[in-house]
Image: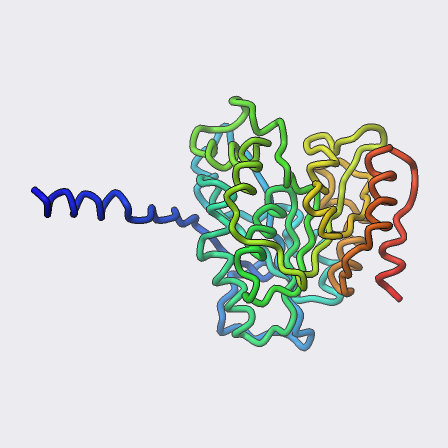
């Protein structure tokens, strides 16, 4: 009886394995077509890699598509974003199935292996650029893997404090529910409370905060969620992009902003700079950020 109870205790106390998403990495620049990348492929003379991480893409009519990695239009070689980034980087597109939570995607081996293999291949700089949930995944990854070799992270319209749209129970197939629900405000709070990893002081990080012309949202994610209190306290810089959530990665001006952030050193803001940005972002004052000009010096 005692041995049976001991065996049961061992079983019930064993850690639950994290589900592994299906992932893929394509190289989308240089070149005119996307190709699956392998570690045996050598970098170009640039030696700088940039990885594009997409956010949620719902498949209400074809739920099976959510179980497979896919390339978004803005990740394609002929997109304005990729063409702009290709001037300074070898550009890669990361794809992943969306049937588990965003946190589990970040903790899975797919992105970790991607970064490790890019390093092994000879890239000396690795930049992660995440849109929407992709920014959440990127942040989780760099927090939990500070020594992985990521040079900098840029998050565009990322719902770090969640998005109310993720609380809805319509518009997406059941198979995508874990991923969608992980982006709800309460789920993000719970994830932050359970996060045992702090953002490394040396991590280069910037938020591109998307906002409609009038209002405190990009149409999906509140401005305060894209640049939450904890990132403000860390001095993470924020750059305003006057564009909607869904148009952010197809916008020429945003593409230029992403390129400037990706190729320059990202320094933390002082308390005064954070306070100034708070007035601009949250008091809805029209102003232009001088952040890019300061980075270029």
Position of residue 96 relative to residue 163, above or below, is: below
Looking at this view, name the residue that lies furthest to the left: 1
Farthest residue to the front: give it.
2
Instruction: Give the x, y percent position of residue 227.
Output: 72, 42
Coordinates of residue 98 in the picture (x, y in percent): 48, 41
Q: How many numbered circles does the render carry? A: 0
The answer to whether 183 is drawn above or below residue 167 in the figure is: below
Q: Residue at x 69, y 66 (%)?
A: 89
With respect to residue 67, does 273 lie above or below?
below
- Residue in front for this viewpoint, 189 or 38: 189
Residue in view at x 63 percent, y 66 percent:
126
Q: How is the image coloured?
A: rainbow
Position of the C terminus, as image quadrant, is bottom right
Q: Residue at x 70, y 56 (%)?
A: 205
Place residue 149 in its image quadrant: bottom right
**Is residue 17 placed above or below 83 in the rendered structure?**
above
Q: If the image is split into quadrants, where does the N terminus sit?
A: top left
**Residue 285 relative to residue 146: left or right:** right
Counting from the top left corner in percent of width and height, residue 152 is at: 67, 61
Q: Position of residue 11 (x, y in %)?
A: 22, 46
In the figure, is residue 115 to the left or right of 127? Answer: left
For this view, does 188 lie left or right of residue 260?
Answer: left
> Is any part of residue 32 visible from this angle?
no
Name the foreground residue: 21 vs 281. Answer: 281
């Amino acid at each position: 009886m005692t041995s049976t109870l001991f065996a049961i205790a061992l079983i019930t106390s064993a850690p639950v394995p994290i589900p592994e998403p299906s992932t893929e990495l394509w190289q989308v620049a240089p070149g005119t077509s996307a190709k699956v990348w392998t570690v045996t492929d050598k970098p170009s003379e640039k030696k700088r890699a940039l990885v594009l991480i997409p956010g949620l893409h719902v498949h209400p009519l074809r739920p099976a598509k959510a179980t497979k990695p896919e390339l978004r239009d803005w990740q394609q070689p002929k997109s304005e974003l990729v063409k702009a980034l290709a001037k300074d980087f070898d550009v890669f597109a990361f794809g992943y199935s969306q049937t588990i939570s965003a946190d589990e995607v970040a903790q899975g081996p797919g992105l970790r292996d991607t970064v490790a293999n890019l390093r092994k291949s000879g890239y000396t700089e690795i930049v992660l650029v995440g849109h929407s949930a992709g920014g959440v995944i990127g942040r989780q990854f760099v927090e939990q893997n500070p020594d992985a070799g990521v040079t900098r992270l840029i998050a565009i319209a990322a719902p770090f404090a969640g998005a109310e749209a993720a609380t809805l129970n319509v518009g997406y197939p059941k198979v995508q529910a874990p991923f969608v629900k992980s982006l709800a405000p309460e789920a993000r709070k719970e994830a932050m409370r359970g996060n045992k990893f702090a953002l490394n002081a040396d991590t280069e990080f910037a938020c591109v905060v998307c906002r409609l012309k009038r209002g405190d949202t990009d149409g999906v994610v509140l401005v305060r969620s894209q640049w939450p209190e904890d990132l403000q306290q860390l001095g993470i810089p924020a750059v305003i992009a006057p564009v909607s959530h869904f148009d952010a990665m197809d916008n020429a001006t945003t593409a230029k902003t992403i390129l400037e952030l990706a190729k320059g050193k990202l320094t933390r803001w002082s308390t005064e700079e954070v306070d100034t940005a708070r007035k601009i972002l949250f008091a809805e004052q029209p102003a232009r950020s001088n952040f890019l000009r300061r980075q270029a010096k």
